[in-house]
Structure formats: structure tokens, C-alpha cells
Image (cartoon, grey):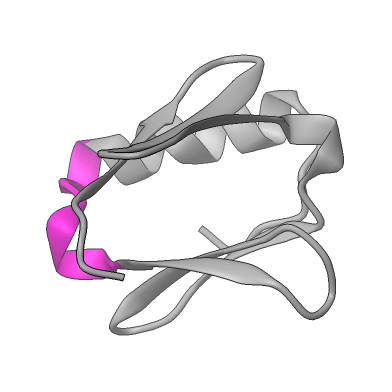
Amino acid sequence: MNESIEYNFMQNDLVVTGESFKSELSWNKVYKVAKTNKWLLIWQTRQIANAIPINNIAGDDLTKLKNILTDNQVINNL
């Protein structure tokens, strides 16, 4: 996959947009969100995750995302 992907963290859903697609995933369909030293992993199921390099996310955006996840009762370690 060689296209740019943009992730928009909205209050009620996650919008993922590429050059050839657009996908919306409501937070109640997200299995969990995990942060490692290098990655933000958005788990759609126990086996499938979207990986976002952590250095592509501003620090205050992680705080906003944590608030959205908490409001929507998504398991996370942010």
C-alpha cells in the first residue's frame, strides 16, 4: 500500500481516508486502542489493527483522543 492515509478522530467515530477509499468506524465497533513507544494501534478485532506511527501524532491530539475513547468506553492505555 503506497497511498497516504489520514485518520480523523471524531467524537462518535473514526474516519479513515486514503486516496482510493474512505471508511468510517464507530467507536463501539473498536476492540481497543493501544499505544507503544513507536505506534498507536487501533484494534478493530483481536487480530486486525490499524498502525499509526506515534511520531505522526501531536501530544495534545493524544490527550483529545484519550478523552474521546473514555467518553465512548473504548479500552485504551493512553
As rendered, which of 22 and 34 lies closer to the eye? 22
Above-or-below relation of 21 to 76:
above
- Residues in magenta, as a range: 53-60
Magenta stretch encompasses residue 5 = no
The image quadrant that residue 64 belongs to is top left
The residue that appears at 52% across and 40% down in the rendered structure is: 66
- Residue shown at 46% from the left, 36% from the top: 65
Left or right relative to 2: residue 78: right
Provide residue 16's location: percent of width, then percent of height.
45, 37
Residue at screen point 32% across, 84% down = 37
Q: Does residue 11 sit above or below 50 in this rendering?
A: above
Where residue 63 sits, quadrant-wise, is: top left
Q: Is residue 71 left or right of residue 2?
A: right
Residue 6 x/y as whole percent:
28, 40
Q: Main secondary structure of the magenta part?
A: helix
Residue 74, percent from left and from top = 76, 44
